[in-house]
Amino acid sequence: MRPLSFFPALILCAPLASAQMDSITTTFASNNGHTGNIFTVSVTSDVTIHSFDINSSSTAAFTVDIYYRLGSYTGFETDPTAWTLGGTASVTSNGADMATPVPVDIDLDVAAGDVWSFYITGSGFKYTDGTQEGAPFVSDSNLTIHEGLGMGPPWSGTYFTPRIWNGTIHYEAGPRLIMPPLVEGTLADFSLVSCEPDSLTVLAYSIVGSGPTGSPYGIIDLSMPIMQLPGLYADANGQASWSVTIPWGLAGLAVYVQGLERKWDGQQFIFTLTNSESGVIQ
């Protein structure tokens, strides 16, 4: 492998970009409420879900729990073992029918074609009567939020349907690195997804550490020396993949990886760093 170059002839005048932060909101026009909601989100494009705003009328600080699971919630409404706790936070409401941010980053990567269920509980939750459980309520180019359930005490089996969760999902779109498990003597498939079709992509790595290292692209989460795999053009689905054989004798070695996308916006090249990942060779 060769040291990091990242298109040095172009980068000196190339503008930079970060992964795009987006959000999708249902409504804050409530007409009902209890202690939380269960609902599903269907995924059109690969994104990373980060955080939520909720609607609560509670006048005192309260605790919000955010759970998620891949697939439908049907049959799992009272089974906490079927869910992953994304995070818990103490929240003070901004008032009924006002967005109240929950200071929890669940950092959940979701893929196109997935359906994810969310179970969000707290105090004084406000929501809206729906028309049909499971019906799409709001969509953008990446996510669709569906009508779901209002609920009583968590895991109690007390539910009200259909109900529309009131809130906002904050998520990150743009190129994303997917890193496989690293096992010596096997083939590891690394991918950059959600790239612009035909954009040029590079995968870089370090075995020294996770940086930070300054660069013309911003702060790279890799320590010098940084090496790179050959550049690839993303396919029609916006994906580039590298298959790498992990040599024998490297068990226990930590590897740090990050990607870069170069795309043309019609006037100039734009460079975007992906998320960084790390793993230890098994």
Image: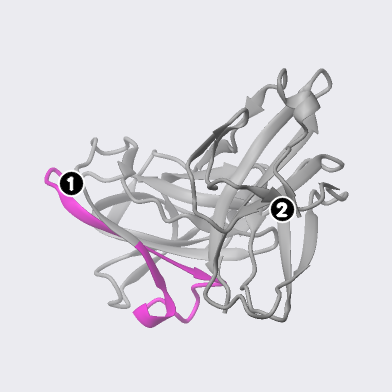
Highlighted magenta segment, given as a residue range: 59-86
Query: Which residue corresponds to the image point at 27% horizontal and 67% vertical from the top-left?
Result: 152
Circle 1: residue type: Ser
Query: Which residue corresponds to the image point at 42% horizontal and 52% vertical from the top-left?
Result: 165
Circle 2: residue type: Leu
Q: Considering the numbered disc 1 on the image, is that residue within a helix, a strand or a loop? A: loop
Q: Considering the numbered disc 2 on the image, is that residue within a helix, a strand or a loop? A: strand
- Coloured how? one colour
Task: Name the residue that disc number 2 marks.
Answer: 192
Task: Give me the C-alpha separation between circle 1 and circle 2.
Answer: 43 Å
Decide: few, some or many residues near mark 2? Use Cα within 10 Å; few <14, some 14-19, many ≥20.
Answer: many
Q: Position of residue 258 (x, y in %)?
A: 62, 50
Q: Nearer the viewer, residue 146 or 48?
A: 48
Is residue 64 within the magenta segment? Answer: yes
Q: Nearer the viewer, residue 227 or 174?
A: 227
93 sits to left or right of 2: left
Q: Mark 1–mark 2 contact, CB under 8 Å?
A: no
Tell which circle, 1 or 2, labels the residue nearer the N-terminal end: 1
Residue 78 to residue 16: above or below: below
Q: Quadrant of residue 21?
A: top right
Task: Name the residue that disc number 1 marks.
Answer: 58
- Which disc is residue 157 wearing? none
Query: Which residue corresponds to the image point at 66% horizontal and 79% vertical from the top-left?
Result: 184
